Image (tube, grey):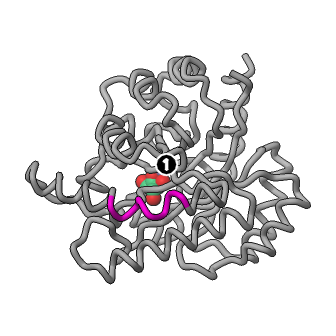
Amino acid sequence: MPPPPLGANTWIWVSPLTDAALDTLAPKIATWGFDLIELPVETPGDWHPARTAALLAEQGLRVGVCAVMAPGRDLTTSDQAIIEATRDYLRHCVEVAATVGAKVVGGPIYAPTGVAMVLEPDERRVAVDRVATGLAPLLDEARAAGVTLALEPLNRYETSLFNTVSQALELVELLNHPALGLLLDTFHLNIEERDLPTAIRTAGHRLAHVHACANDRGAPGRDHLDWPGIRAALADIDYRGALTIESFSSGNRSIATAASIWRPLARTQDEIATEGLQFLRDLFTS
Ligand code: LER
Ligand code: MN
């Protein structure tokens, strides 16, 4: 496995992302030696894709896009207007990705983040089928744009629909489309999977993107995760995607609340990026 591209998600510093924030963050992230920057689309129009494409080309940065499942974005509902609005949002993310040159749009592209409740098995079946029906028409469009949608299972406190790799894989295999894969986030895997390397091997060729975070959401490496085991599993499945450090600032009230970040996870947010990058570089080149 060649060393993977390593990225930083702008949520480490800001929410929502703006053009002004990108003007500062993109050069910083490039200078530190990251290969890639990951850009959340919270509200369409927060930042401008064509302008950003020019900025990132100048900085020599590759790019990933995150779909953000805010309240009202939901494919599990029976409300057709909400399904259509969610599809329109996901289409917009694919267009943004095509404009900035991203190959992957990742995120929990099925239900609003933070909505967790009891689901009886038959209710879950209905919800999963609705997600399949909701996503299906988008996949040929994504493929035509050269973009893969990467569905991210989340921990049990953030969703009740897809917590494990096996659950998410069920949907991905049901749709069995080259433009649909998985995004695995080590923070969520650590809560839900009995063995992280096994979970990664289970995802296999469906794995399209990875969020690399410490078990406490801080810099990868300063934690108890089995990083050599994670690296070995990625090598075994011949993973060719990127790893992006995703963390959140406790100083930004709305994103801190959404991600349950109640304390700083490092002395500075920059340190999460720089120490995480150093650790991941060493991990994949040693
Ligand atoms: C949130 O916990 C997360 O991992 C994000 O990538 C999804 O919004
Ligand atoms: Mn994530």
Q: In the depicted view, which residue is nearer to us: 173 or 124?
A: 173
207 over 139 or under it: above or below: above
Residue 151 in picture, x, y percent from top left: 44, 50
Residue 17 in picture, x, y percent from top left: 63, 72
**Outermost residue to the right:** 58
Residue at the spot 55% in from the left edge and 17% down from the top edge: 236
Secondary structure state at the residue bearing disc 1: strand
Residue at the spot 49% in from the left edge and 74% down from the top edge: 89
**Quadrant of image for the N terminus:** top right
Tell whether 250 sits left or right of 40.
left
Q: Amino acid at mark 1?
A: Leu
Residue 198 part of the magenta segment: no
Q: In the depicted view, which residue is nearer to us: 110 or 215?
A: 110
How many residues crowd mark 1 within 10 Å: few (<14), some (14–19), many (20+)? many
Residue at the spot 57% in from the left edge and 30% down from the top edge: 221
Tell whether 171 sits left or right of 123.
right
Would you identify the image quadrant in which residue 53 lies? bottom right
Residue 24 in picture, x, y percent from top left: 79, 67
From the image, give the main secondary structure of the stretch colored magenta: helix
Q: In the depicted view, which residue is nearer to us: 8 or 73?
A: 73
The answer to whether any part of residue 262 appears in the image is no
Magenta residues, start to end: 133-140
92 over 100 or under it: above or below: below
The answer to whether any part of residue 223 appears in the image is yes
The residue that mark 1 highlights is 180
Mark 1 Cβ inside 8 Å of ligand 1? no
Instruction: Please give the count of numbered marks on the rendered protein.
Output: 1
Residue at the spot 72% in from the left edge and 43% down from the top edge: 274
